[in-house]
Image: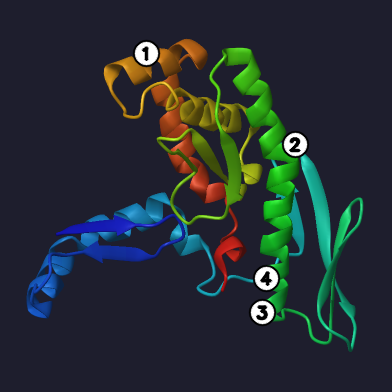
């Protein structure tokens, strides 16, 4: 059995099939202090139980801010993105559909901002990939398939540029080594000196990702 605390506080327990519920409860109880310590490390206690609709969005990756405002509108809910403002046109503020519109907009911004950086670092390093994809994931910053397809989490837009570059170089290094072997880390460290320190910093950067990204 294993326990994982996701970046925004969700606790996942993985158990073998046919495990009795009493055994699961005992296992979780024995690790309750560890769970709470992990949640404190992630800053979960300081966040509202239900993600609030944002009033501002800031991309650390490009140092860009938008105010988020509700515009009364009696038609179908829609999003309008201006130079420094995002308007949610809806009958009532905080409409759940507004979260989904913001999430879709975020993925579009990921394609516009993250993919060009991926292409640039690919050219600089000579590490080629076949295709790119922007997703919105709860616990993974990125991935690289055996076919050379690289997926990046749109949430990386909320992370500082140095860590975004590390993330991209990490995935590009997987086009050469599909594992985390010594050869992989040697290559990555040659591209991003202090790779393991950067890796730890990237894991902690989940604290900078606003919870509304994953509101359903």
User: Residue at the top extreme?
Assistant: 190
Closest to the camera, between mark 3 and mark 1, is 1
Q: CA distance from mark 4 to mark 1?
A: 41 Å
Q: Of callouts 2 and 1, which one flags the residue occurring earlier in the amino acid sequence?
A: 2
Q: Of callouts 3 and 1, which one flags the residue occurring earlier in the amino acid sequence?
A: 3
Query: Which residue is label 2 attached to?
Result: 62
Q: Quadrant of the rendered structure where residue 144 is? A: top left
**In what element is the residue under mark 4?**
helix
Check residue 186 in the rendering and tell me which mark sits there, or answer none: 1
| Residue 131 in picture, x, y percent from top left | 58, 37
**In what element is the residue under mark 3?**
helix
**In what element is the residue under mark 2?**
loop
Q: Work out which quarter of the rendered image holds the C terminus and state it.
A: bottom right
Q: CA distance from mark 3 to mark 1?
A: 46 Å
Is residue 189 rendered to the left or right of residue 169? left
Q: Are marks 3 and 4 in contact (CB under 8 Å)?
A: yes
| Residue 67 in picture, x, y percent from top left | 83, 58
| Relative depth, front residue between 85 and 129 | 129
Query: Which residue is label 4 attached to?
Result: 99
74 to 2, vertically: above or below? below
**In what element is the residue under mark 1?**
helix
**Mark 2 nearby-residue class (10 Å; few <14, some 14–19, many ≥20):** few
| Residue 39 in picture, x, y percent from top left | 37, 57
Q: Of callouts 3 and 2, which one flags the residue occurring earlier in the amino acid sequence?
A: 2
């Amino acid at each position: 059995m294993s326990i994982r605390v996701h970046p925004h506080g969700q606790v996942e327990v993985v158990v073998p099939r046919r495990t009795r519920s009493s055994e699961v409860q005992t296992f979780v109880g024995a690790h309750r202090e560890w769970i709470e310590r992990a949640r404190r490390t992630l800053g979960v206690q300081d966040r509202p139980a239900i993600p609030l609709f944002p009033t501002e969005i800031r991309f650390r990756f490009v140092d860009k801010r938008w105010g988020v405002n509700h515009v009364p509108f009696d038609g179908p809910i829609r999003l309008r993105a201006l130079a420094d403002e995002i308007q949610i046109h809806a009958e009532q503020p905080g409409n759940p559909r507004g979260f989904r519109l913001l999430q879709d907009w975020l993925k579009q911004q990921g394609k516009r901002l993250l993919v060009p950086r991926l292409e640039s670092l690919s050219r600089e390093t000579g590490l080629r990939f076949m295709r790119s994809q922007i997703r919105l994931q709860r616990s993974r910053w990125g991935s690289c398939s055996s076919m050379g397809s690289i997926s990046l989490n749109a949430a990386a837009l909320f992370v500082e540029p140095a860590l975004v570059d590390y993330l991209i170089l990490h995935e590009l290094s997987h086009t050469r080594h599909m594992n985390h072997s010594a050869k992989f880390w040697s290559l990555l460290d040659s591209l991003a000196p202090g790779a393991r320190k950067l890796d730890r910093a990237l894991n902690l950067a989940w604290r900078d990702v606003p919870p509304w990204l994953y509101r359903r």
